[in-house]
Image (cartoon, rainbow, N blue to C red):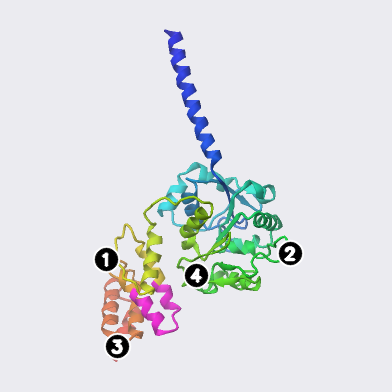
Amino acid sequence: MISTFFKKTGIALLAALSLFGVAQAEEAAKPKVLLVASSYGVAGDPKKPGMEFDEYAMAYHLLSPQLQLELASPKGGKVEVGEYNKTKSYNAAVLTHPDAMALLTNSKKLSDVKAQDYQAVLVLGGKGAMFDLAEHLPLQQLLSEMAAQQKVIAAVCHGPAALLHVKNADGSLLLQGKKVAGFSNQEETMFAKEMLPLYPFLLQDAVTKAGALYQQTGPMLPLVVQDGTLITGQNPYSTPALVDAILAQLQLSTAPRQPYPDEQAVSIIQQFLAGQPIPAQLDEKLVDIPLLAIWGYYYLQFAKADSDRQHAVQVMELVSGSFTDPQFLMALAQGQLQLGNTSRAVELAKAVLKQQPDSKAAQELLSKVKA
């Protein structure tokens, strides 16, 4: 009986080992892609920002099923990240994924990786990239060799800072004459104003100075630009489309999926600005309502023309029934008043007073209208 038990156990063990070997072989057969992150970040120090976790999470979530992923940084070891929303679906998925988190705590040192080991590289953004990636010589060498080998070179948000000083084999700058996207000056002013005195340069200006044909769209709206094997994205919301472009360049298909709620929100804004029809009602489970509200709020603050102000107000009105933060409603009231929509401005100001009876802004608006 004991002999039979050991035989059965041995067969089961061999079967398990065989399946494990098949899984390892399948993983090894996947193309290998290197993710690159900044080492500049210091936990808890807003003046020492790190990597954009959203970009890492989206990239890992969408690339890992078909690719082997490794992560490298200038110093190696733990990669610090900036503040992020842990409840976003892609962030939540990566936070519970041991392999994904292991890469963040034990990144490779860039000076130790070799171009021939990878089919593509993706330089992730986050404000930290502005401080250490552009001047990091091992990264410049790695990217130069990958360009010479016709490998895919991708970068998103502030990640294109890594490309500024990369040279081709003939000594010319990699970016010379190339179409490139990256975090715009307008986005810096709107969403990272506190960093402007600290940055060594502005990415849009530096990319243009390097000879690139800089491309951009509206603030925090997705844009991916491809020029040969060079693929760049303007901001974090460009990451899913950039991943699709990487997969296509590697001749891999993208799996059908439900767009992320924030991805859906910026898509709706783009449709609206392009004059295309948008849903009359928005499903809060499928669309990031707060993102729509925040986009409209900031776009309104920086609007210079009535057309821009009108667009911001219309986007804000899309979500005003479900996003009722007093500051948001008051900004919308001011916008409506500037556009001459007095009755709506009054209605919104009164809604604010119901939440905050001592709101001076709402009281002043009503007094101004009455006068």
* Residue 85 location, quadrant: bottom left
Q: Which of marks 3 and 4 is nearer the N terminus?
A: 4
- Furthest residue in direction top, as rendered: 1
Determine which residue is flagged by label 2: 171
Determine which residue is flagged by label 4: 191
Distance between the Cα atoms at labels 3 and 2? 65 Å
What mark, if any, has residue 281 been given in the picture? 1
Local SS, label 3 = helix
Give yes or no for contact between labels 3 and 1 (Cβ–Cβ under 8 Å).
Answer: no
Q: Which of marks 1 and 4 is nearer the N terminus?
A: 4
- Judging depth in this view, the residue of 122 and 308 nearest the camera is 122
Local SS, label 2 = loop
Question: Taking 114 as reference, is 298 left or right?
Answer: left
Magenta stretch? 296-314
Q: How many marks?
A: 4
Q: In which quarter of the image is the N terminus?
A: top left
What mark, if any, has residue 369 been given in the picture? 3
Q: In which quarter of the image is the C terminus?
A: bottom left
- Judging depth in this view, the residue of 261 and 214 nearest the camera is 214
Q: Does the magenta stretch include residue 114?
A: no
